[in-house]
Amino acid sequence: QVQVAESGGGLVQAGGSLRLSCTNSGLRMDDYAMGWFRQAPGKEREAISCINRSGGKIYYADSIKGRFTLSRDNAANTLYLQMNSLTPEDTGMYYCAADRYMNTYSLSWCSPSSFQNWGRGTQVTVSP
């Protein structure tokens, strides 16, 4: 069973940076599409950024383009999300997810419903 775990969340002032990490249970990173999602209180979970199996396709939500960067270290079995220029609107629980069989050619491939394996989340809080 695939297990992923997030780390790196915390409290930061607006304009600051954080780097989130997502490690897996030893599976090959390039066998899985992976993604970052966030959920603010009272809101639905939304996609932030996803990467396909080969690493040749990366999706970014419009709200974070130019500020967040997704990267993957296959040797370390780790997915990263570098978050810069954070704003209070970025506050929420951030989740990492993985899926081996999804169709990454679908227009909606980077959506919560496309992923089967989820971590427990790491909290990011951005103060004004």
Image (cartoon, rainbow, N blue to C red):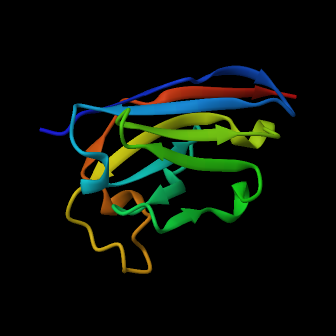
Q: Estimate the x, y position of residue 75 in percent, counting from the top left.
A: 36, 37
Q: Residue at x 20, y 64 (%)?
A: 101
Q: Residue 12 sits in which quadrant?
A: top right
Give x and y (percent) for residue 51.
45, 59
* Residue at 64 percent of width and 49 percent of height: 69
> The N terminus is located in which quarter?
top left
Q: How many marks?
A: 0
On the question of residue 4 being in view, the answer is yes
Residue found at x 68% / y 26%:
125
In which quarter of the view is residue 61 placed?
Answer: bottom right
Horizontal side of residue 13 vs 65, given as left or right: right
Q: Farthest residue toward the front?
A: 75
Relative vertical location of residue 87 with respect to residue 53 in this rendering, above or below: above
- What residue lies at 58% left-to-right and 24% top-to-bottom? 9
Q: Measuring from the top left, give residue 76's x and y in whole percent.
A: 38, 32
| Location of residue 50 in the rendering, given as x and y in whole percent from the top left corner | 48, 58
Which quarter shows the C terminus? top right
Q: Judge whether residue 32 can be spotted in this image.
A: no
| Relative to 29, residue 108 above or below | below
User: On the rendered structure, is 1 left or right of 92?
Assistant: left
> With 107 as the anchor, is 90 left or right in this view?
right
* Residue closest to the far left: 1
Which is more toward the observer, 41 or 108? 108
